Amino acid sequence: MNIFRIIEQLSEVDSDVLGRFDSRRAVFKTLGDTAKKGALAAAPVFVASLFQKAYGQTTAPSVIDVLNYALTLELLEEDFYTKMIAAGQVPTGAPAAAIALIKKHESAHVTLLTNTVKALNGTPVTGKKFDPAKFPADYTTQLAFAQALEDTGVRAYKGQAGNLMGKTAGSTNLLQVALQIHSVEARHAAHIRTMRAQAPWIPAADSNLPAPLGPVYTGAIPESNVTQSGVNLTSQLGATYSANDAAASFDEILTMAEVLDASRAGGLVV
């Protein structure tokens, strides 16, 4: 097992991978000690626990479970934008064009994930909708919900990266596909934020916002986190970075359970 090659490949699609480890030096030292002791048989166990911790999952779901989880979120988003367009409150011009394009992207994600689950002989989830009872009555609140959904998608895809490492559908690398979708969700989130006259990145204070936004930015590792690789960026690198600088520079994961919690996306899907 070439752990260095695995980390190198993962860093090509997840630039934050090294920041997920409590201590990069400690990880490599432990691997070196293991090799010196001739305990190479234990290396896979150590590496598995390393990535399990880095990507925040306690029990690894199956690939079909992960894909259906992603498909549920995409169906939720696709239906939300369908409802938003049908409500007829999006201003014409650039706002309407942006929402129509984002909806088109979500539909493409639904098609891709559905076909991938089928290709793996799984049964894709269907019929997941945005709860009509919770659909906002006005355009301003609809945009706030759109931001919550997109930022949830960014954190959700990132949270499943470890479960898709090395997994394929035919010759397709599922981790690469998932993180490509993750990058599109991030661009959606940034654009929706600019439509709401917000900064395109997530400041530390967003964790304190009321629902539906605030809960999206909480979790075991909240978006207000200022510590990466065991280093507090606001106090151990001089006075260069504020809490907002540190928080906005990194996206944090949400676990599957956190995303599906009733306080987040789980409370919006029927």
Image (spheres, rainbow, N blue to C red):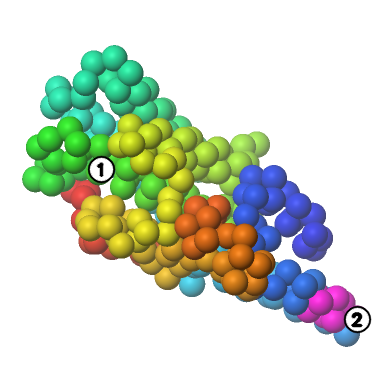
At mark 2, the secondary structure is helix
231 or 259: nearer the viewer: 231
- Location of the N terminus by quadrant is bottom right
Q: Is residue 255 left or right of residue 164?
A: left
Residue 30 lies within the magenta run: yes
Q: Is 63 drawn above or below residue 33 in the view shown?
A: above
Q: Amino acid at mark 2?
A: Lys
Pointers 2 and 1 in contact (C-beta within 8 Å)? no
* Residue marked by disc 1: 144
Q: Residue at x 44, y 40 (%)?
A: 200
25 or 2: nearer the viewer: 25
Region of the chain picked out in magenta, as a range: 29-36
From the top left corner, tell me how far across and down residue 57 is, in percent. 49, 67
Q: Residue at x 40, y 28 (%)?
A: 105
The image quarter in which residue 43 lies: bottom right
The image quarter in which residue 203 lies: bottom left
Q: Is residue 155 left or right of residue 215?
A: right
* Residue marked by disc 2: 36
From the top left corner, tell me how far across and down residue 262 is, in percent. 23, 61
